[in-house]
Amino acid sequence: MVRPSRSTRSATDTVATDETLRLVRLPLADTLRQLHDSDSTVALQRGIEALRRQIDDPCSALRAASAVDDVTTFSRRYLFDALDQIAAAFTLERARYYAARLLRATLEVRTGAINDIDLNRWKEYDDILTDSLWLFDRRDSSGVHRAGYWGNFVPQIPHQLMRRYTRRGDLVIDPFAGAGTTLIEGRRLGRHTIGVELRADVVEQARATLAAEPDRYGALCALEVGDSAVFDWHAALARHGRRSAQLAILHPPYFDIIRFSDDPRDLANAPSVEVFLARLGDTVARAADVLDNGRYLALVIGDKYAHGDWIPLGFLAMNEVLQRGFGLKSIIVKNFDETTGKRSQKELWRYRALVGGFYVFKHEYIFVFRKK
Ligand SMILES: C[S@@+](CC[C@H](N)C(=O)[O-])C[C@H]1O[C@@H](n2cnc3c(N)ncnc32)[C@H](O)[C@@H]1O
């Protein structure tokens, strides 16, 4: 899909690791056209040098944008890498090819159907993960994000999933909303969110947290108290004027490893793994009811030990989803963040592992499915 380039891009859309340059689009495009039309490599090199100087000069016509100018933003690293590539081309023909590509990235946005990633600038998105091993050295604790809720996931998980599988304005549903991490990220990224959580006290606390998160895009951010295994998503969406969802993120209890409540409907209180999986399956079916065909569902879950045996909860849960009209797109392995409690028991677990012949859990899974 090709559309005219947006005049501004949000900081959350682009890489925040280097400087973001705001450049006046038309003179930049004219200069790139001239580079493209250069009749010798010497003229081309000179043109690139002049352009680099202009970009670095805050007073140049490229940089000094007025309120009415049509502005395009580039990450500095991306733009200079692209200019280096043109300069380093072996032939004039190749250099023209790279110049034309940069010109396209200046003038138009090309996105796929399910996200806002500008494919004309794909190299700019180096913060979007595409490998199946996710190693986070610390959780994002910016703004209202807190590690306080026992069992909440790192905000980077819903952040990555929403950037890959939704566009701004899409609706994301979360049947195990907990402290509202998905909803906070949705609010930041301009994605509408509806979450369901069994514990009324947790919902109340999450609503208070969400109220403190700046609402830049006016995105819907609704939390309801309910049992997601029997939840009526159609009615919930209708209450908010929506008919379907574009992404579902499920982060259920990992069966009984954390006690969230005394409520028998709580998946953590299921009497057996079989009942846990059946209720999880019901939850998936309910969510799938409102998910558009071709859109994605992500399941975040880890394994557990019982009576000395490794219970592959993740893969058992994966099978439940596969039986409900989904195809498997990816299995991501993510490192387990060390909680304070576990850190103090680390030595003890290492000793037990050596004695018992097992391994200490250090990972969980993010299964990514696509609705057929
Ligand atoms: C692993 S936590 C999810 C944490 C969440 N991702 C966050 O970052 O805060 C699982 C949550 O599911 C809730 N839960 C358990 N059974 C439920 C059910 N049947 N319906 C809705 N929520 C349920 C628990 O109370 C708990 O808050």
Image: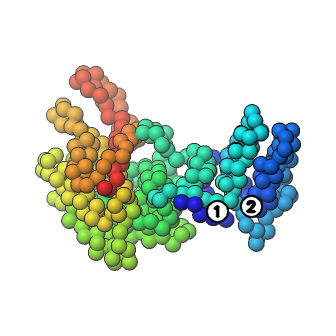
Residue sitting at 76 percent across and 72 percent down?
68
In this image, 242 relative to 61: left or right?
Answer: left
Please tell me how crowded label 1 is: few (under 14), some (14-19), or many (20+) other residues with Cα within 10 Å: some
> Is residue 13 at least partly visible in the picture?
no
> Is residue 109 at least partly visible in the picture?
yes
Residue nearest the viewer, comparing 306 with 12: 12
Locate ligand 1 by image quadrant.
bottom left
The quadrant in which the C terminus is found is bottom left
CA gap, disc 2 and disc 1: 10 Å
Residue sitting at 80 percent across and 49 percent down?
37
Dividing the picture into quarters, in which one does residue 61 lie? bottom right
Query: What x and y, as percent, mark residue 111?
Result: 54, 57
Residue sitting at 47 percent across and 59 percent down?
113
Residue nearest the viewer, comparing 177 with 244: 244
Residue 5 shows which numbered tag?
Answer: 1
Query: What x and y, as percent, mark residue 235?
Result: 28, 75
Residue at mark 2: 25
Q: Is the residue at mark 1 in contact range of ligand 1, meaning its CB lies under 8 Å from it?
A: no
Name the kind of residue labelled 1 in the image: Ser
Please tell me how crowded label 2 is: few (under 14), some (14-19), or many (20+) other residues with Cα within 10 Å: many
Determine whether label 2 and label 1 are within 8 Å by CB: yes
Name above or below for residue 26 compared with residue 258: below
Marker count (numbered) = 2
Secondary element at image label 2: helix
Q: Earlier in the sequence, mark 2 or mark 1?
A: 1
Name above or below for residue 91 compared with residue 298: above
